[in-house]
């Protein structure tokens, strides 16, 4: 794996982790913390995770698309 592919997978993995933690905090935790709303933090984490996932997928598609759209120009070989 190239370093770029590793960074892309880390971005997707981190985004999925944020979405999962946010969903757990939003839907499954019923704790009360003074001055802190757990469900709001969960919602914020899910939104940040979705935004990160969209950005990661955009960069992956642009990198892969760029490699396919290249034009190769070759000079004729001398006789």
Image (cartoon, rainbow, N blue to C red):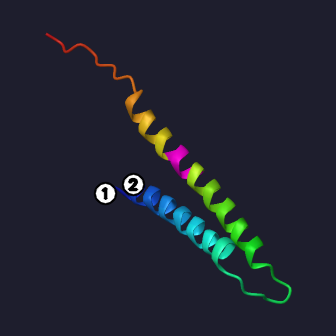
- Residue 14 position, x and y percent, is 53, 66
Report which residue position mark 1 lands on: 1
Q: Which mark is residue 5?
A: 2
The residue lying toward the viewer, choosing from 56 and 79, is 56
- Residue 38 position, x and y percent, is 74, 78
Report the residue at 71% width, 66% height from top. 43
Please report contact status of discs 1 and 2: CB closer than 8 Å, yes or no. Answer: yes
Report the residue at 48% width, 40% height from top. 61
Local packing at callout 2 (Cα closer than 10 Å; few below 14, some 14-19, many 20+) is few
Judge left or right: residue 77 versus residue 24: left
- Residue 58 position, x and y percent, is 54, 44
Mark 2 element type: helix
Local packing at callout 1 (Cα closer than 10 Å; few below 14, some 14-19, many 20+) is few
- Residue 18 position, x and y percent, is 59, 68
Residue furthest out toward the right: 35
Residue 38 within the magenta-colored segment of the rendering? no
The residue lying toward the viewer, choosing from 55 and 45, is 45
Work out which quarter of the rendered image holds the N terminus and state it: bottom left
Q: Which residues are magenta?
A: 55-59
């Amino acid at each position: 794996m190239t370093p770029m592919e590793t960074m892309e997978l880390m971005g997707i993995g981190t985004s999925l982790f944020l979405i999962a933690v946010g969903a757990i905090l939003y839907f499954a935790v019923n704790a009360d913390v003074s001055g802190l709303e757990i469900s709001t933090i969960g919602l914020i984490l899910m939104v940040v995770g979705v935004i990160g996932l969209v950005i990661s997928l955009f960069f992956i598609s642009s990198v892969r698309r760029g490699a396919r759209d290249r034009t190769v120009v070759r000079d004729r070989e001398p006789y």
